[in-house]
Amino acid sequence: MYNTIIDTIGNTPLVKLNKLPQKYDISCKIFAKCEYLNAGGSIKDRIAKRMIEDAEKSGQIKPGDTLIEPTSGNTGIGIALVGAIKEYKVIITMPDKMSQEKSSILKILGADIIRTPTNVSSDSPNSHINIAKKIRDTINLKEPNTAHILNQYSNNSNPMVHYDTTALELLEQTNNKIDMIVIGAGTGGTITGVAKRLKERLGHNIQVIGVDPHGSLLAKGNEQTYNYNIEGIGYDFVPDVLDRTFVDDWVKTNDKDSFIMARELIRYEGLLVGGSSGSIMFAAIQAIQGNTLFNKTHPLQKDDTCVIILPDSVRNYMTKFIDDEWMIKHNYMSINK
């Protein structure tokens, strides 16, 4: 029996995909790690729990303190969930483009939300990152050392929780048989931690594919950045926790392909996932066929195994890509679809 819901975080199931591989003429096996089944609805629950617990052990934070986090939403939800149970005040800074559903969940968990402009660079004074720093400093002027940014972008607890848990779960669930793994990159903690452990165990037998939307520079480092509607992956800077040396190659994705594929994961496989899961599934099909950004990987064969990580739930996007009218309005789907 668990003491609290946060004790249930992790150990998410791995399920075999059936209809989509057939539809896209994929002969190898594809398994999906269903991280959207975590307590707060995303893979970010893992890092929220770990960052808070590690900060408590080090004496950095204590119950009653204020935790401030710049986020695209899911890390904020994880921190707010853990904070509600452990009695922390939580303030979340989040760009305007992120869904209203995320705000509603954060509010009911007791967090305060500050919306920031989407179309500003990460180093702008008005970015969600710098607004969070300003709020922290303002609180600490009045009450020293009571406000903290755990900072998923540079906190080593982020990749380490995936090294210690997610990767080991995958090895156990696949009996150490993974030929390719496809992971979306936001902060980069998931792909760094998982890839590091898998490469230590499997060596050259595994190909690690990162997924990055057009408009983000995580894959190349010098691409011109611009706004996109997919949430949770991609940035206009390279976070400290992202170690690209563990990534063998990348696939760049666009909004339309991602949202359509997310809807297909729901329709054909019964997986109630968010839009970035569509990006990852689309990228997996490309990578399995050998279509990657730098052409450093090889196609998979019938007896090979590909694993994809599905980061979050459809719950966050009920008024977005799930809605036909929203899809039509953004020209992702025709009115006769």
Image: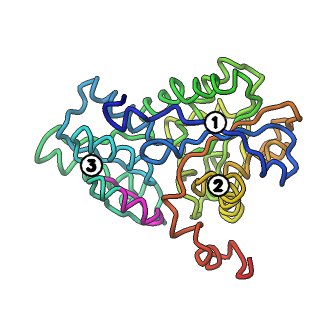
According to the picture, the residue beneath numbered tag 1 turns out to be 14
For the C terminus, which image quadrant?
bottom right
| Residue 242 sits above or below residue 107 on the image | above
Earlier sequence position, callout 1 versus callout 3: 1
Disc 1 or 2, which lies upstream in sequence? Answer: 1
Where is mark 3, residue-wise? 90
Residue 142, x across and y down, in percent: 11, 47
The amino acid type found where label 3 is placed reads: Val
- In the rendered structure, which amino acid carries the disc numbered 2? Pro
Q: Earlier in the sequence, mark 2 or mark 3?
A: 3
Residue 37, placed above or below residue 122: above
Disc 2 secondary structure class? strand
Q: SS of the residue at dot 3? A: strand
Check residue 102 for magenta coloring: yes
Q: How many marks?
A: 3
Q: What stretch of residues is rendered in magenta?
A: 91-105
Q: Residue at x 62, y 51 (%)?
A: 271
Residue farthest along the front direction in this orientation: 1
Q: Residue at x 64, y 27 (%)?
A: 173
Image point 70% across, 21% down: which residue?
Answer: 176
